[in-house]
Amino acid sequence: MITKLTKMFSNFFKDLFHSKKHVKLGLYGPPNGGKTTLANRICKDWLGEEMGKVSHIEHETREIQVKEQINIKSGKKELSFSLVDTPGIATKIDYEDFVKKGLKAAEAKKRAKEATKGVIDAIRWLDDMDCVIVVLDATKDPYSQVNITIIGNLAARSIPVLIAANKMDLRKADKDKVAAAFPQYPVACISAKKGTNMEEFYESLFKVAA
Amino acid sequence: MTLTLQFVPYSEIEHVSSIGRIKKLLALAKQHKIVLLEGRLRKEEEIELIKTTMEEINKEFRGIELAVIYPGNTVTHDLLQKLKVNMISVLLGDRVGVTIIGPASVVRKVKRDPDKIQLFTHHTLPSAGRRLATLANRLQGKRR
């Protein structure tokens, strides 16, 4: 309640003095949805450099990564934000899954241990976000409990949400399924890897975050 | 291999603190039992359950599969249906719906649609799967 009131007053005064908005923008979602690929795309588009390493093996991002002061423009509007790339949220982590993907046992165990810590950190950071992009793999079933839990918690905290239906370049991608699963939220259909539809994505981001 | 389904009535967690609820449900899952909770946890408790699960992962315990099914999850454009769901939620609160928590050592995958849950176990246990589906359907029917 106090947090909500503080946010309300803070927004009121920002609007009153027309100050340029600076938001903490989080990238959340299940593992391998393309959060870091999207973070890299945003950073490349506006800073000319990448943010983190990507991999086909789940839980490549195991630590929170923050890129401060990204300024994006759309027409006369400008948005300044810190981009927070978070580890994928999962309900189970088994090192044997990493072994199956080709990692050695010791490396897989280390990765699993770091991944569990990463999930805990991602959840802890949830309260600090001003706006969140939930990055979903559009080729997968969007109706998973992790997705519902993340989005439900963001709604409970009154944090604005934009859903990025990612991997639209793949044949199996189904944007309608993603939109139908979360009809109360705007959905931007993109391919972060190929940079497809990023203009529309930034416009949606302005609407949600500004 | 025997598969144990543990039914937890809502009355058992109704007056328990959030931490207490999570600990209780996780303790059952760690005993390799599939927990069938009448009703659902609050949203903050759901994410806290995931966090606590991660804190407790070790050699034996690899996490959980979680699924919550309740009428409010169903996407509907029917105003009357929406009103009905809202009325039920106001009257019964978190008692509405069913929550399934399966240890990852037993449950491989949970596939869910708004109205049904399919549990895929690591072993072929058709009779147990049928029992679980029947029980979940019965609970849903009772609440509607």
Image (tube, coloured by chain):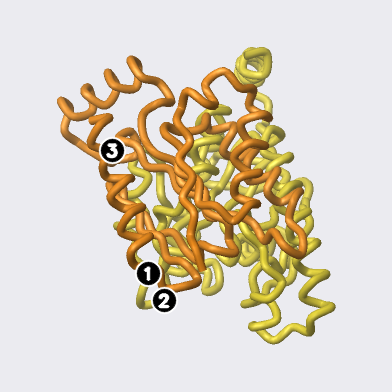
Q: Which mark is residue A28?
A: none
Which hue belongs to chain B? orange
Do the residues indicated by labels 2 and 1 lie within the same chain of the protein?
yes
Closest to the observer: B139 or A100?
Answer: B139
Residue A203, visible in the rendered structure: no
- Characterize the local packing of mark 3: few (<14), some (14-19) or many (20 or more) Cα atoms within 10 angstroms: many
**Residues tagged 2 and 1 counted as in contact (Cβ below 8 A):** yes
The local secondary structure at tag 1 comes to: loop
Q: Which residue is mark 3?
A: B140
Q: Which residue sits at x=33%, y=54%? A: B131
Query: What letter labels the chain drawn in yellow?
Result: A
Q: Chain of mark 1?
A: A
The local secondary structure at tag 3 comes to: helix
From the viewer's perspective, is the residue at label 3 or at label 1 nearer?
A: 3
Q: Chain of mark 2?
A: A
Q: Does A119 sit left or right of B2 as displayed?
A: right
Q: Which mark is residue A170?
A: 2
Percent across and percent down for residue B113 are 32, 53
Q: Does A198 sit left or right of A68 as displayed?
A: left
Q: Which residue is mark 1?
A: A173
Q: Which residue sits at x=63%, y=41%? A: B49
Q: Does B38 sit left or right of A75 as displayed?
A: left
Where residue A57 sits, quadrant-wise, is bottom right
Q: Chain of mark 3?
A: B
Circle 3: residue type: Gln
Where residue A7 sits, quadrant-wise, is top right
